[in-house]
Amino acid sequence: MTDTAPSPAQSLPVFRAHDFVVSEGANLGDTLACADDLLLDDAYMLAPMAQPVRLSIHATDTSHLTVAPGSACGTPGAAIHLDCALTLMSPDGQITDAVVMVEVDDAGHIEQIYLLPLAALSPRTPYALVGIDPDDARTKFAHMACARFTRGTHITMSSGAQKPIEELAVGDRILTRNDGVQEVRWVGQSTVRATGDFAPIRIRAGTLNNDRDLIVSPDHRLFIYQRQDRLGAGRSELLVKARHLVNGDSVTVQDGGFVDYFELLFDTHQIIYAEGIAAESMLIDTRTKPVVPEDVSALLTQHTAAGLSGLDVTETLLDRPDAAEILRRASTR
C-alpha cells in the first residue's frame, strides 16, 4: 500500500545510553536500558559534557529500521528496534517524551541503546521516569515524520475558496497541483506538546509569497518551483523541509505550550495549497503508516508518492540564513 521507492535516510539527534544515567533511585548508577529493565520513579541525568550524535536510519519496511551509511553512530546495515516510549519529568514539573532505540547485531544481541528525546534535555537536571510504554514508541516515532498543518491553516478548495483545515471532512474536494481536484480520504488530528521535534515552524506572510502566516510541523515539506535555479539544486522542482528554512526572523520555531496538528490524506501523495504555499499532503510510507487507522490504510492500497520522489533538497544546500529569500526570488523570477 506504500510507495516502493527507497525512502531517504532520516537523521535523528540521539544520546548514547552511557550519557543518560540513573542519579537517584533503585538503579542508581545504571545507564539507560530496555523497557524490561527500567523502573518508574528512577531519576536520570545527562552527563555534563554529553552531546547528541546523529543517527541516520532507513525504514526498510513497516517494522524494520536499519542504520544508514554515513551515520555518525551505529553500524551501517544494523537493525534498529523501537523499544519503548518514555515520559520524563523535570523538577519543575515539565514533561518530556522520549523514545528508546536499540541497535542489534545479526545474532540479535544488543550492540547499543540510544535515547531519542522529543524535546531538549538539560545537563545536570534530574528527570524522573514517570511513564514507560512499549506500545507507543512506533506511533510517537511516526508522528515526527508526518506532514502536519496547524489549526487555522486555510486550505484551497476545488472552488478556490479558503477553508480552515479543522473544518475539512472526508469527501471534501481539494485543489491539487498535479492531479486537479481530489477528495479527502482521511483527516487526522492530535494535540501534542509544542517542544523539540514537535514544535511547529512559522513561515511569516510573504516569506515564500504566502498570503498569511503558515505554521506546519518541522518535517513538513513545501513545494518550490524555481524559475531560475538560484539554489543550485540542479532542477526546478523542489521539496524543502520547513525546519531547514528556520532563520530566526521570517521563519521561526514556535516552542512552548501545546499545538493542534492535522493531517490530510488523499488516494495518493499530493501537493495542495495552504495559505498560498504549495505544500505536501500526508504520505503513507514505512515510517508514517502507524499513524493511519488500519481500516483507512486498507482502502488506500495504491497510495504512492505520485511522482514526487527524488525532489528533496539536502540540508547542506539550505544551510544559509537567506535560504528562504533565495527560494522566494527563484520562484517569482
Image (cartoon, rainbow, N blue to C red):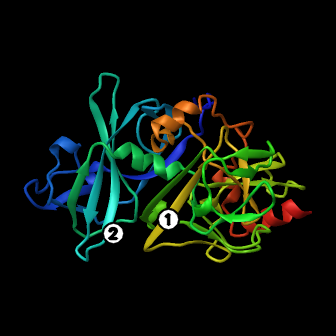
Q: Quadrant of the N terminus?
A: top right
Q: Nearer the viewer, residue 263 or 248?
A: 263
Badge 1: how crowded within 10 Å, few (<14), some, or many (20+)?
some
User: Which residue is situated farthest in the right direction here?
Assistant: 333
**Visible residue check, residue 173:** yes
Badge 2: how crowded within 10 Å, few (<14), some, or many (20+)?
some
Which label sits on residue 86?
A: none
In three-dimensional space, the C-alpha distance between marks 2 and 1, rounded to whole angstroms, equals: 26 Å
Q: Quadrant of the C terminus?
A: bottom right
Q: Are marks 2 and 1 in contact (CB under 8 Å)?
A: no
Residue 288: x and y in percent read 51, 42
Q: Nearer the viewer, residue 98 or 73?
A: 98
Residue 232: x and y in percent read 80, 52
Residue at left offset 66%, top offset 61%: 319
Q: Which residue is mark 1?
A: 260
Q: Secondary structure at mark 2?
A: loop
Residue 314 relative to residue 64: left or right: right
Residue at left offset 11%, top offset 57%: 28
Q: Nearer the viewer, residue 118 or 109?
A: 118
| Earlier residue among tags 2 and 1 | 2
Q: Amino acid at mark 2?
A: Ser
Q: Which residue is mark 2?
A: 122
User: Which residue is situated farthest in the top direction here?
Assistant: 107
Residue at left offset 50%, top offset 65%: 260
